[in-house]
Image (cartoon, grey):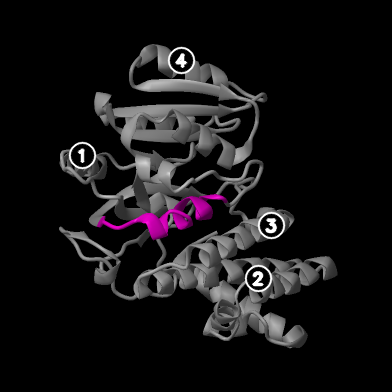
Amino acid sequence: MKLLSVAIPCYNSSDYMRHCIESLLEGGDEVEILIVDDGSAKDDTAVIADEYEKKYPGICRAIHQENKGHGGAVNTGLKNAEGVYFKVVDSDDWVDRGAYMEILKMLRRFADQSEPVDMLISNFVYEKQGARRKKVMNYRTTLPKDQVFSWKDVKVFMLGQYILMHSVIYRTELLRQCGLELPEHTFYVDNIFVYQPLPHVKTMYYLDVNFYRYFIGRDDQSVNEQVMIGRIDQQIRVNKLMIDYFVEAKPRPRKLRHYMIRYLEIMMVISSILAIRSGAEEDMAKKKELWQYARKKNLMMYLRLRFGFLGQGMNLPGKGGRNVSVAGYKISQKFFGFN
């Protein structure tokens, strides 16, 4: 059995996937690298995947499938994973070698325990193209360091401080036991990947290293704002699924519940601001319907989302109110370094 399985969803990724794979090869034969060719037909993605499997047998595996989208590729990676732990690394991202060695050292320690830790959290770096200062997302003020901990030991997450796909390595069996299966042909499902398993996580460890390098800057990237506006239906679909997961899970303890509400809050903000930025009447109607959906699902949850600071900011009346919402979003965008 491998220590760590890393799934790399690849769709027409030949221009940058080698950098990603090469960074992960530093882990040696304790790591299996699952290169999931998600129906790539416009470039040499499939050829490159086969090349690495041939060159590194027992480490790299090329998996070819018809196009199912990012979520479908992650599902395939999880289905084929043989490692004790599971990580997703997007094909245009990479990992830091020094931090990687620290991560593997810690996972070895966990794997030797009778009850392995459920989730390892580390920092990630926004590798924003053209930015001189690289924004680092760390959790030093929120999570205990150098110890195994549970939700009751977690402090308050700051605004803009969230556990994202880039931050986490989950125990593989936990993901399977919680029934994780991401929607196919849908963008932004990385939020579900992190969110749905949280109520099943009992033990965590925070390793304060800058492991994951998250590249931002391609015009066609899914987190490009104009691209996101064009895919607002998919953003809202993911948002609704996360509302469903929250309502069904009834998360406990209180600190976990509070964190999951905060995560939902930022998702509602993103969906709302995309509709406002779009300016189209049909998108504004979708925004209204999303908030109504939350209200129908759970009134107490809705009240917390709608009348919190961010919820009020996304529902200011009139054109002037929408301008204020956009201005607030731009300030946050600049401060936190996203998009």
Residue type marked 4? Glu
Mark 4 or mark 2: whose residue is earlier in sequence? 4
Which amino acid does the dot numbered 1 rest on? Ala
Q: Is residue 26 on the magenta stretch?
A: no
Q: Residue at x 16, y 59 (%)?
A: 147
Which SS class for mark 1?
Answer: helix
Q: Is residue 292 above or below residue 179?
A: below
- Of label 1 and label 4, which has the lower sequence position? 4
Alpha carbon distance from label 1 to label 4:
31 Å
Figure check: 65 above or below 176: above
Residue 219 rendering spot, x and y as whole percentages: 63, 48
> Where is 82 relative to 213, above or below?
above
Q: Nearer the viewer, residue 105 or 21?
A: 105
Q: Which residue is mark 1?
A: 111
Measured in 3D between alpha carbons, the distance from the residue under mark 1 to the one under mark 2, in whole angstroms, is 43 Å
Give the amino acid at mark 3: Gln
Residue drawn 34% across the image and 46% down it: 169
Region of the chain picked out in magenta, as a range: 189-204
In 3D space, how far apart are the residues under numbered discs 1 and 3 (Cα atoms)? Answer: 43 Å
Report the residue marked by disc 2. Answer: 273
State the residue in front, 258 or 247. 247
Viewer-nearest residue: 333 or 163: 163
From the viewer's perspective, is the residue at label 2 or at label 3 nearer?
A: 2
Percent of width and height locating residue 36: 51, 28
Q: From the image, state whether disc 4 or disc 3 is nearer to you.
A: 4
- Separation of disc 2 and disc 3 at Cα? 12 Å
Badge 3: residue crowd in 10 Å (few <14, some 14–19, many ≥20):
some
**SS for callout 2:** helix
Q: CA distance from mark 4 to mark 2?
A: 43 Å
Residue with the mark numbered 3: 226
Label whose residue precedes the other's in the sequence (2 or 3): 3
Could you tell me which secondary element the residue under label 3 belongs to? helix
